Image (cartoon, grey):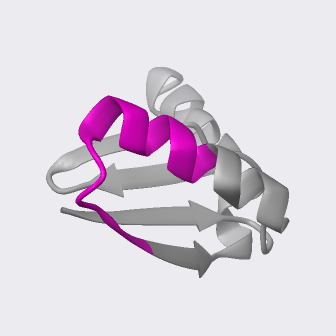
Amino acid sequence: HKVTVTSAAALPEEETGQIISKITSAHGDRLTFEWKVDPAVIAGLHIQIADKVYDGTVLNRLERLQSLSR
């Protein structure tokens, strides 16, 4: 499976290592990682593993708050 990790800025090597370790322990070691930088996410991580998405970004939280106020 392909894992895409998006963050607002490039992540330090130590942090990418921790992310890889946690994801491989949960999903197995037959994964390929792609690292993306998108300042629009503001902070936090957007992680896509195959068809599953884990979105802990500030942008996602702001969008959810905005949709609640409509």
Q: Is residue 65 above or below residue 49?
A: above
Residue 1 visible to an observer of this rendering: yes
Q: Taking 6 as reference, is 38 left or right?
A: right
> Residue 53 is drawn in which quadrant?
top left
From the top left corner, tell me how far across and down residue 12 is, in percent: 85, 65
Query: Which contiguous range is marked in magenta?
Result: 19-33
From the top left corner, tell me how far across and down residue 34 is, in percent: 45, 76
Quadrant position of the C terminus in the picture: top left
The secondary structure making up most of the magenta span is helix
Q: Is residue 14 magenta?
A: no
From the top left corner, tell me how far across and down residue 6 is, in percent: 56, 65
The answer to which of 14 and 38 lies nearer the viewer is 14
Name the residue rendered at 64%, 38% in the picture: 62
Name the residue rendered at 65%, 75% in the picture: 38
| Extreme residue toward the top, this view | 68
Q: Is residue 2 above or below residue 54?
A: below
Q: Taking 15 as reference, is 18 left or right?
A: left
From the top left corner, tell me how far across and down residue 63 is, in percent: 53, 42
Q: Taking 48 as reference, is 34 left or right?
A: right
